Image (tube, rainbow, N blue to C red):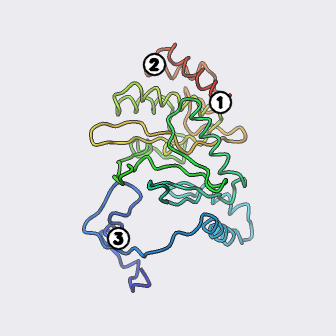
Amino acid sequence: MQRRGIAPNSLSVLDRLAIVGKNGPGALEFEPAEEMLTEYKDSSLDTIAAEINKIIDDATVVTDDLVTEELFRIGGSSGGTRPKIFRKYEGSDWIIKFRAAIDPVDIGRREFEIMELAQKAGLEVPDHKLFNDKYFGVKRFDRKDNGEKVFMISASGLLDADHNQPVLDYTDLLSLTAKLTRNMRDVEKMFRLMVFNVWINNTDDHAKNFAFLYDGKDWKLAPAFDLTQTVGTWEHATSVNCKGKDITGADTLAVARQVDIPEKRAGDIMLEVKDGIQ
């Protein structure tokens, strides 16, 4: 904007929405649009990663590197703490993630392997790929192959729940799924996701990591995403039967009972997940 002689602080809210136009990451579009895009050539993923590392390195040249890296971990934007880009791949829209300063060097492969485990455990997951053998990417499930946008909203947005605080129980998520989708299969999908998160120790199960899609007629649970395995004994961001850790099979069955999933069906799902991750 400054190259065009526009002072960013002079823009009104409506000016900013006009600049977003049809280019926002979500499904909302704003008219009339003010096109300000510049044509550019796609850089290689390795080049983008190198640029990201330069930014991270500059950000950590301070008196206390550990403090800066911790701030980076907890201070991510609504897009998450890890750098990521949108990119076309084989005609479809994908999100590709890069390593953050606090991540292990093989974080991309780790996330890919966990997504593979989730698929084996019966979870619905998006198409995914390990680019260049190190950058984890997923095909966007809020975009159709023809480019049509699909409305998506997180549990955090629906419930006005702070994703930085442990404010939800899985009973809340399962009840929300039942009321919104009116489909018991989606409720069972959420239950399966809960069991998987508990058994792989994914404690990053906060309210923004659960979402719903609207096709113009019905709501449905979005595929599982942002699946990680936490090292250590952190408590789950979303509790199970009011417990953040030391969660037992009895706790998961107690959640199932509260949303009318038959105990036998809940037990079958638990066994399917266990078989999948082993």
Q: Quadrant of the C terminus?
A: top right
Using the image, determine if residue 243 lies above or below residue 112: above
Residue 48 horizontal side relative to residue 95, left or right: right
User: Which residue is found at the position 65% from the left and 58% from the top?
Assistant: 100
Residue 237 screen position, x and y as percent: 57, 40
The residue identified by callout 2 is 261
Residue 192 screen position, x and y as percent: 53, 28
Amino acid at the residue labelled 1: Ile
Amino acid at the residue labelled 3: Ile
Residue 209 screen position, x and y as percent: 51, 44
The residue closer to the viewer here, 214 or 261, is 214
Using the image, determine if residue 58 lies above or below residue 24: below
The residue identified by callout 3 is 19
Residue 28: image quadrant is bottom left
Amino acid at the residue labelled 2: Ile
Secondary structure of residue under mark 1:
helix
